[in-house]
Image: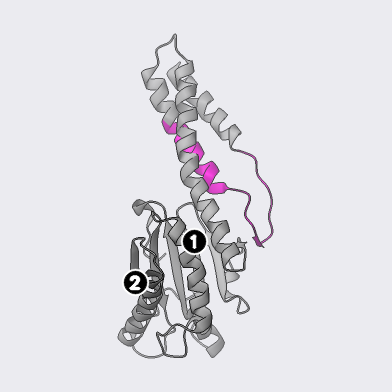
């Protein structure tokens, strides 16, 4: 009976959060997949708690546990969805669902999201002069918009990673990529951002495309900003 109640409660929670919409590759995201995934996970956990504490005369407790778990899990996902849309709007773009967006040379900024984080990719050609870690005026304007958003979400964890092309030594590129990530972090802090910020230099690890031509190398030079709501969701940006 308890197993049956768990299945019923989980199915009910999944149904509650199952409405979907289709979207092109660059739009305001209304699918809220993180909300639904978080709600389903929370529902299963809540149903298990309700089922294990309910006796045979109190089957409703399993459903109550599922509803409570769905609310908690859905809240975590909702925050990621909300932040992704707000970041994209502030930066004058949309949330991209196109896996090839990062290698589109016409896009200086790509906002994407997963079940664990929101990611903003800034193309280095827009962010820094050649071989420099000094932010351009345009970069400062974009980072300032991100700062305004982060001030509204002080609990969001920020991870900034710099990437270069493969010209030059690994160590030189590592230092350059680290300084560029640090420049973004320093500017955010100068604008009053008090979030936890971590920086990492990735040198020429994780290229988006082969470093064979100048056009390809330009695509690999970038800064990526990850936004997390929980420490356990953090990834190694140089590898994932």
Q: Is residue 181 left or right of residue 129?
A: left
For label 2, the SS is: strand
Query: Residue 226: where, in percent of width, then height?
Result: 44, 63
Query: Is residue 238 something one can see in this rendering?
Result: no
Residue 52 versus residue 183 in the image, above or below: above
Q: Residue at point 56% right, 47% down?
A: 33
Instruction: Examine the image and state in which quarter residue 228 appears.
Output: bottom left
- Residue assigned mark 1: 149
Residue 150 versus residue 173: which sits nearer the camera?
150
Q: Is residue 46 above or below residue 190?
A: above
Magenta span = 18-45
Residue holding disc 2: 200
Mark nearer the N terminus (1 vs 2)? 1
Q: How many marks?
A: 2
Placement of 197 over or under 39, stated as above or below: below
How far, Cα to Cα, is label 1 from label 2?
22 Å
> Which of the 4 image quadrants contains residue 62?
top left
Residue 14 x %, y %? 56, 34
- Residue 182 placement (x, y as % from top left): 35, 76
Tell me the residue at 50%/38% (across/down).
39
* SS at mark 1 in the image: helix
Q: Residue at x 51, y 30 (%)?
A: 10
> Does the stretch in magenta take in 191?
no
22 displayed left or right of 192: right
């Amino acid at each position: 009976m308890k197993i049956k109640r768990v299945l019923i409660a989980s199915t009910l929670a999944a149904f509650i959060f199952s409405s979907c919409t289709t979207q092109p590759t660059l739009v305001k995201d209304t699918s809220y997949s993180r909300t639904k995934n978080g709600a389903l996970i929370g529902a299963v956990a809540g149903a298990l708690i309700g089922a294990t504490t309910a006796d045979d005369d109190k089957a409703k407790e399993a459903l109550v546990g599922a509803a409570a778990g769905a609310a908690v899990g859905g809240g975590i996902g909702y925050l990621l969805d909300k932040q992704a849309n707000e970041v994209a709007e502030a930066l004058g773009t949309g949330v991209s669902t196109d896996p090839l967006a990062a290698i589109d040379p016409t896009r200086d900024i790509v906002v994407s999201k997963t079940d664990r984080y929101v990611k903003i990719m800034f193309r280095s050609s827009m962010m820094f002069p050649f071989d420099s870690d000094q932010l351009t005026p345009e970069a400062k304007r974009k980072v300032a918009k991100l700062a305004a958003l982060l001030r509204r979400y002080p609990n969001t964890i920020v991870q900034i990673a710099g990437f270069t092309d493969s010209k030059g030594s690994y160590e030189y590129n590592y230092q350059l990529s680290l300084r560029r990530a640090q420049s973004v972090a320093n500017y955010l802090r100068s604008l009053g951002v008090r979030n936890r910020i971590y920086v990492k230099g990735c040198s020429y690890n994780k290229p988006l495309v082969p470093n064979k031509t100048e056009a390809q190398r330009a695509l690999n030079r970038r800064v990526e900003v990850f936004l997390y709501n929980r420490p356990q969701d953090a990834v190694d940006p140089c590898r994932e």
